[in-house]
Amino acid sequence: MLQKPPAFKTSLTFQNCTIAYFYSQIEQQKRILQRIREVLPESLAKQVRHCLVKEKKLLIYTDSAAWASQVRFYNNAILAAIAPLTRSSIELMQIKISAEWTGFALRPLRKAKLPSVEKIEIIRNDILNITDDQLKQALLKLSATLERLSCNT
């Protein structure tokens, strides 16, 4: 007669206060995020990705700085709306951009196009003909900066 092997229990079937605490935190964050989205206009609510309550601070994550600046206008309305849902009073709202720390770039990084060494020399030579001291100093600084940057690449 073959014995049946004991059934494997998943980790969630065991009583664990730590896991229960984290689940309660996750549920609270979901409720807060839902409430934030209800306060915001529909187009803006879609851009709010996550939220987190940390001490007396509410962190809201969006995809770009443009959306973050729009959400900031609703600071008072958001804080008032989530007050009944939080265990402690929230005093500060901070908006973070999640695209930077996820590694997802919204657009490729652009690299500056530097002029050739010959063109930098032309700028430097033309400075001799300029009578305005302020313009002369500015062009000297520009040519020095361009020369330094072209040497580094």
Image: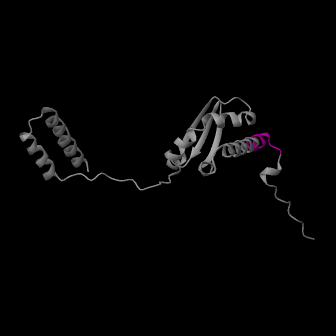
- Magenta segment's dominant SS is helix
Determine if the magenta segment contains residue 21.
yes
Which quadrant of the rendered structure holds the N terminus?
bottom right
Determine if the magenta segment contains residue 137.
no
- Image coordinates of residue 124 in percent, x first then y, are 12, 43
Residue at the image point whose x is 27% and y is 53% from the top = 113
Horizontal side of residue 82 vs 49, given as left or right: right
| Count of number-bearing discs | 0
Q: Along the line of sight, which residue is nearer the eye, 3 or 11?
A: 11
Residue at the image point whose x is 59% and y is 48% from the top = 44
- Image coordinates of residue 24 in percent, x first then y, are 76, 42
Horizontal side of residue 18 vs 69, given as left or right: right
Name above or below for residue 65 compared with residue 53: below
Residue at the image point whose x is 82% and y is 58% from the top = 8
Q: Along the line of sight, which residue is nearer the eye, 96 or 4?
A: 96
- Image coordinates of residue 123 in percent, x first then y, are 13, 46
Residue at the image point whose x is 72% and y is 29% from the top = 88
- Image coordinates of residue 11 in percent, x first then y, are 78, 51
Name above or below for residue 153 compared with residue 85: below
Q: Residue furthest bottom?
A: 1
